Amino acid sequence: MKWTDVLDIAIELAEAHPEIDPKTVRFVDLHNWVVELPDFDDDHSRGGERVLEAIQQAWIDEVE
């Protein structure tokens, strides 16, 4: 998975952290959780604010 796989990342996060409300996640934690996903294989430094916002929104959409 790459940073551009926003929906796939959101699905994986929803499965990995079902107890978490994605609206309350800080970007630092979100970044760490993304790079810790088993299928994630991209440059860790490329996860900027825009992509994290997109991932967070996709995660919110996924759980609602």
Image (cartoon, rainbow, N blue to C red):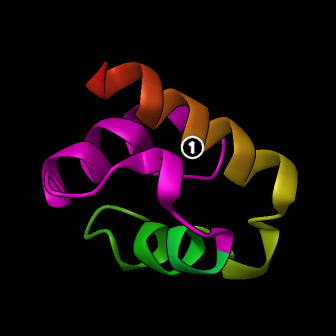
Residue at 28% x, 27% y: name it. 63
Instruction: From the top left corner, tell me how far across and down residue 32 is, in percent.
Output: 50, 81
In the drawing, does residue 12 fall left or right of residue 30? left
Front residue of 23/34: it is 23
The answer to whether any part of residue 5 appears in the image is no
Q: Secondary structure at mark 1?
A: helix
Query: Which residue is identified by label 1?
Result: 56
Residue at 66% x, 79% y: name it. 44
Where are the magenta residues, as a range? 1-27
For the C terminus, the quadrant is top left
Residue at 64% x, 80% y: name it. 28
Q: Amino acid at mark 1?
A: Gln
The answer to whether any part of residue 25 appears in the image is yes
Instruction: From the top left corner, tell me how far across and down residue 30 is, in percent.
Output: 53, 67
Magenta stretch: includes residue 16: yes
Instruction: From the top left corner, tell me how far across and down residue 37 is, in percent.
Output: 32, 68
Residue at 27% x, 57% y: name it. 20
In this rendering, the count of numbered labels is 1
In the drawing, does residue 20 fall left or right of residue 60? left
Front residue of 28/44: it is 28
In the drawing, does residue 61 fall left or right of residue 37? right
Q: Residues within 10 Å of mark 1 (few under 14, many from 20)?
A: many
Instruction: From the top left corner, tell me how far across and down residue 17 is, in percent.
Output: 20, 59
Above-or-below relation of 60 to 12: above
Magenta stretch: includes residue 5: yes
Above-or-below relation of 5 to 15: above
